[in-house]
Image: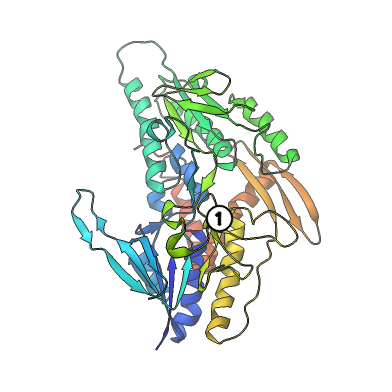
Amino acid sequence: MTHRIVIVGGGAGGLELATRLGKTLGKRGTASVMLVDANLTHIWKPLLHEVAAGSLNSSEDELNYVAQAKWNHFEFQLGRMSGLDRQRKKIQLAATYDEEGVELLPARELGYDTLVIAVGSTTNDFGTQGAAQHCLFLDTRKQAERFHQQLLNHYLRAHAGQTDAVEQISVAIVGAGATGVELAAELHNAAHELAAYGLDRILPENMHITLIEAGPRVLPALPERISGPVHKTLEKLGVKVLTNASVSEVTADSLITADGQTIPASLKVWAAGIRAPGFLKDIDGLETNRINQLQVLPTLQTTRDENIFAFGDCAACPQPGSDRNVPPRAQAAHQQASLLAKSLKLRIEGKDLPTYKYTDYGSLISLSRFSAVGNLMGNLTGSVMLEGWLARMFYISLYRMHQMALYGVFRTAMLMLGSRIGRGTDPRLKLH
């Protein structure tokens, strides 16, 4: 019987792994490869802040799972994992409903010989009072599009106003990690673009953006030599940056910090902290940590079941020689997907599995069209600080590398050419 590999989660890592395995094991008939995801399309998660600001039209940059499966010799199943039966080697998928609440697909089970869980993470609001009710999150394309629509609605209402008074809009972003910082810069750019298209009842200087960080500096996970220039650039753009400010409550029209400061905001985004999806918590006896991540060995196998692997943001993977786990970053998921593409072939052949060691190639932060900053790390160059246009080019290249892993070099080149041509006919900002 053909070995059955089931990959749950079509994010950057899961989709890259399914594509790699399909091209090798699937194409040769060595194994059947199945990808399961709750959505029909994929968009690179680091781009969601651009979708939220309107800088990126998600319908043009999305990838269809069904088409990708056909092109790369794997199968796609639409569904959301809800349970696991390790003894019977089956996963449970919840019923899928359409927008009107009509059942589209019934609840069902899928069998596996090797299961790979790559369901990513969601934002962690730490149980803050009012956060879930009054904040928007940027975990999915739908959430990013919802934020964009609410932002655009403010401008459209102001544009249709009958008075000559200039109106204002206030946006508060909780969390000054990469997502929060990049969103703040993109929103500043969006304010200028919207005014340029005639929606100028809200002037760029009247979009008040506040970035709130509980720690002592922005980008707390990155070196201080990166966070310092980023902080200065944000302030030059007019973004109000508050550090050492922990949010204790969120209301319909404001945020309240632990020291009693009230920050008015008509749009509120929570971009602080991560946790793995709740359904993973101790799922069928697998070991998980306090943020629901599956504990894995250096081989990326779960600690209590050698037939189940996990990687990416949903996995707590130890770093050799450190008391910390591998950081939840896109480069880690990419590295782990590359390792698993080799490991699963070896597993089918009955050979020993290699172990994963995280390699940090540096970090790049985009500040929209205004700038970019970061550092590249390598064996030959050491750590090299980048700023401005060069850093921006390297940042863009990260997405192109992701596309090449999925489409190959030729099709990625065609996508780049099509994008270049479209600049002359498409608006610079999504206006619907």
Q: Position of residue 58 (x, y in %)?
A: 41, 49
| Number of numbered tags placed on the structure image | 1
Relative height, residue 150 to residue 226 (above, below): above
Task: Give residue 295's quadrant in the image.
Answer: bottom right
Residue located at (44% from left, 18% from top): 168
Residue located at (41% from left, 46% from top): 57
Q: Is residue 155 left or right of residue 361?
A: left
Residue 10 makes an appearance in the image: no
Q: Position of residue 188 (x, y in %)?
A: 53, 30
| Nearer to us in this view, 243 or 19 | 243
Residue 82 makes an appearance in the image: yes
Q: Is residue 236 left or right of residue 403?
A: right
| Nearer to us in this view, 155 or 100 | 100
Q: Is residue 246 left or right of residue 361?
A: left
Furthest-front residue in this view? 285
Per the image, the residue denoted by label 1 is 399
Image quadrant holding the N terminus, namely: bottom left
Image quadrant holding the C terminus, namely: top left
Mark 1, residues whose alpha carbon is within 10 Å: few (<14), some, or many (≥20)?
some
Residue located at (65% from left, 35% from top): 218
Furthest-top residue in this view? 164
Q: Position of residue 376 (x, y in %)?
A: 72, 52
Q: Position of residue 83 (x, y in %)?
A: 37, 62
Relative height, residue 223 to residue 111 (above, below): above
Relative height, residue 350 to residue 45 (above, below): below
The colour scheme used to paint the residues is rainbow
| SS at circle 1 | helix
At label 1, which amino acid type do we have?
Answer: Tyr
| Nearer to us in this view, 371 or 108 | 108
